[in-house]
Amino acid sequence: MWVGRRVAELPTPAFVVDEAVARRNAERMLQRCGALGLRLRPHMKTHKTLEGGELMTGGTRRGIVVSTLAEARFFAAGGFDNILYAYPLPFDKLEECAALAQRLEAFQVLVDSRDALAQLRRRRLAHGARWLVWMKLDCGNGRAGLRHTDPSALELARAIAQEAPEEVALAGIYAHCGNTYGCSGVPEIQAVAQATTTAMLEFMGTLRAAGVACPASSVGSTPSCSHPVADMGRLTEVHPGNYIFCDLQQVTVGSCQLGDVAVRVLTRVVGHYPQRNQLLVDCGWAGLSLHGLGQLPTGYALVEGHPDLKLVALTQEHGHVEPAAGVLDFGKFPLGSLLALIPYHACATAAMHPVYYVHAEGTVVATWQPVRGW
């Protein structure tokens, strides 16, 4: 019902996507990876939509990463295949993983422990199918995975590849360089990208020396893949995700420019409070998320076109806006007027919305509905 309408008519808060910017971001990453000779396995966790996946895979619908089984089921039902569930194998969801592994040409799981491998071996697949397993390395991010220098990493890789080759196959080694989000500027991003890549290459060399065959290596984050180092071309693939939307966090880190941010949250002024020098808007944390607190001089978001305004407080359905300095001119912001918030973290903000309004120069051209849940 909203296609063909102007975004200014949308009920707020509304999550809007500039189709041209999102498409440009997707195409740019495909070209960048192609120039390096790398496969791009885009992560779906930011947008969680079939349409976004279509853009990020260049229309192939092959070779993606997901972070929840809800995403895996959703994309599989939408015609996507070669799906990597890049989350340490959850034992309570093993049957769901098995169903997808039997159904798809290539459904792949991630492990970083012998216990997880044992779970897979206890749940054998039917009809001669094998579990396709990636092993998770921690190359400095400090979240999940084994350190590449830890002897147990080689032991686990050898076990995946060799202990039961008729049941389990080693598909690759995977590392997330999420520590790029602590960077400021391209040199720092590239230093982390180089360190992660070097660790991965060293471990792949360790595997070769030990006679462990491993067909693929994958690293990634939007910052590192936006400013790749030459050695990344010696790997097999990369797996960034946020780049299709981008956000103020990416701008702050140095991944992109403000013009690359494809998303906004539209909100309306619903109250004037001169006694506290504030506007009240109809976007609270339920429409924006709280991610961004303390990260921006403008508060929880950037009010587009109004760098002198600050979004200083959020409750569930309300936002408080005040001037950075001086007395607010309430006449510039009549009740019902529209403001556009540029979010700090697009992944967190997108997760707050059941529908995305995709527009071309301010006219809605499509609505995308993301999958939710786990």
Image (tube, grey):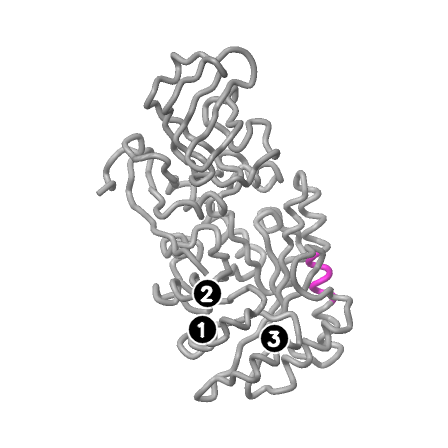
Pointer 2 with pointer 3, Cβ within 8 A? no
Q: Position of residue 8 (x, y in %)?
A: 31, 30
Q: Is residue 42 left or right of residue 52?
A: right
Q: Position of residue 297 (x, y in %)?
A: 59, 27
Circle 3 sits on which residue? 116
Q: Position of residue 361 (x, y in %)?
A: 33, 34
Pointer 1 with pointer 2, Cβ within 8 A? yes
Q: Amino acid at mark 2?
A: Leu
Circle 1 sits on which residue? 96
Which tag, 2 or 3, sits closer to the chain's start? Answer: 2
Residue depicted at x 29% and y 45%: 366
Circle 2 sits on which residue? 69
Q: Position of residue 130 (x, y in %)?
A: 51, 82
Q: Is residue 4 magenta?
A: no
Q: Amino acid at mark 1?
A: Glu
Q: Is residue 255 left or right of residue 337?
A: right
Hey, which residue is sitting farthest front in the picture? 275
First to last magenta residue range: 196-202
Q: Quadrant of the N terminus?
A: top left
Which tag, 3 or 1, sits closer to the chain's start? Answer: 1
Q: Main secondary structure of the magenta part?
A: helix
Q: Amino acid at mark 3?
A: Ala
